[in-house]
Amino acid sequence: MKILVQGKTQGVILKSQHPINFLGTVDKKTGIISDKNHELFDKSIKHSILVFPNGVGSSVGAYTIYSIKSNNTAPLAMICQKADLTVATGCALANIPLVIVTDDEFSSLQTGQKILLDTKSSNPITLL
Amino acid sequence: MELTQEEESALKGEQGEIMQMAYRILVATGEATDAEKLIPIEWAHLSGVNYNTIGDAGEEFLSGISKNARVKVRTTLNPMGFDIDNVSNYGLDNNFISKQLSIRKSYETMGVTPSFSCIPYEIFDMPKDGTQVSFAESNAAIHANSFDNLKTNKESAFSALASAITGKSPYSSLRKEDSPNLTIRMKIDNPNELTYGMLGFFAGKVGNNSVNISGVGEMDRRSCKALCGGMGTSGTCAKFLFGDGAPDCEKVDFDKKEMDEIYDELNTAEKGDLITLGSPQLGLEEISDLTSRLKGRSFKKRCMIFCPRTVKDQARKIGYTNELERAGCEILADCCTCLTPLISKDNVDSVTTNSIKGAYYLKNSNGVDVNLKPLSQIIEDETR
């Protein structure tokens, strides 16, 4: 596990097997995913622990992450399988905890699980 | 990542809040890409300019930092939301216009060149081979790495901004000599720019940092730009090399099946209410080519053409603009099809374009249907 942005929070996992292009497919005001081909279409990422493989696409997606945080529609934390610069820098500026997990850890996380994420702990992800 | 004493001091906030923020972003970037240190860069190209994409939060953020932040290296800028010369024709509200002008002012205050272009590689002189740069625009980063012998990460809007303010960037794998672990075998005969856009979109989906592409012949500039635009839209991949790659490289075919899947994902209409050309923006060469292909014919419906300001000015001097306007084209500088606020689902159901990048964002962000065709087909079907 690699910690890219520190923080402590607890919440319910919303997981996608699909990468996310934050720009253009995440509504800044509601946090709802607008891409009809996406696994999370019509779902809101607001206040979730968002688990997804990685961010893709436009570099401006970092501003989308900053905007959803400012609009209070951002996830509480993000957990990815692969680090990408759009998500890493968006979370760094918006202060959204971000960790990169191994493939096994990624497969074990499921939508609906309630977890405690504490990047300072020796065991950063605890199932509640 | 190892930091020098001066960099550590900036990260602690001893050189002010702006430097602290910039170094916090660079450190997150470095950790994400397993870089061991920061290195100097000579040119930053920023995204995050269009009010349609960065919104109020972005506008306020830039206005705030522009009070103190100044760029340390040559810094250029992505397109904004409109062309000030003809914005009154498009029914944008005053709030949009004033927020967009505020964003422009913030960047100019920081010392950024207001180039408003997503094709810096086509309108500026290129630095010498191997120069380290930080390009945020995804098609431009891929073009720089693959065709221009420059070196850049696929920067985010914030990592490029942090590089502009500090003159530094993490020494990540894309900045070194890397060898891709995947080769895409292009199997489609007689490709046009739409085929290359779909090949790029496919490569972005299956590739990681970089990919080899085999089986492609000579590509014209339009096709190169389409490949880079497509790849930047779908993935994290930021470089391709031509050739078969190492013998132990994993091989993936791009054949009719793969192409049809992408076409079916992005093509959602049989025809468009209007045509857009330019995502990435058109350069002078493409404007000249379009003018000669028209040969006195006129578009049967609206055709919006997006290009950089310098290209629009040159096109007017040479006389291309007169010919294109006669053919019914609307020529827009400083903005782009991608994330344009000038096309709204309130008055447009579907758009015809030859751009995969444009199609993806028109569909997902503007919420309109898209009809994909290569330029040759657009001219055949849509002009008389």
Image: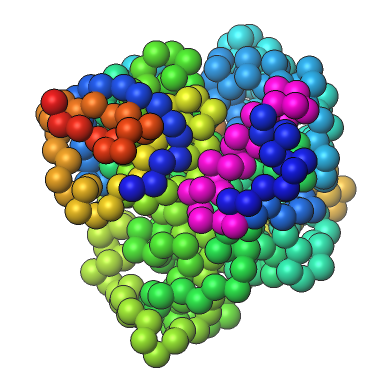
Q: Which residues are magenta?
A: B13-36
Residue beneath the point at 70% across and 17% down: B63
B78, B356: nearer the viewer: B78
Quick one: which residue is furthest to the top in this view? Answer: B94
Q: Is residue B257 left or right of residue B177?
A: left
Horizontal and vertical percent position of residue B373: 42, 56
Quarter occupied by the C terminus of chain A: top left
Horizontal and vertical percent position of residue B310: 81, 45
Q: Is residue B4 left or right of residue B372?
A: right
> Magenta includes B17?
yes
Vertical relation: B62 (above or below) B145: above
Vertical relation: B196 (above or below) B368: below
Colouring style: rainbow
B92, B378: nearer the viewer: B92
Residue beneath the point at 17% across and 41% down: A109
Residue beneath the point at 46% across and 74% down: B180
Residue B327 sits in quarter:
top right
Vertical relation: B292 (above or below) B187: above
Horizontal and vertical percent position of residue B324: 69, 47
Quick one: which residue is furthest to the front in this view? Answer: A122
Query: Is residue B10 shown to the viewer in this render?
Result: yes
Residue B115 sits in quarter:
top right
> Magenta includes B366?
no
Residue beneath the point at 66% across and 33% down: B11
Q: Is residue B40 left or right of residue A107?
A: right
Residue B108 sits in quarter:
top right
Q: Is residue B257 left or right of residue A24?
A: left
Vertical relation: B222 (above or below) A17: below
Query: Is residue B229 shown to the viewer in this render?
Result: no
Horizontal and vertical percent position of residue A77: 34, 28
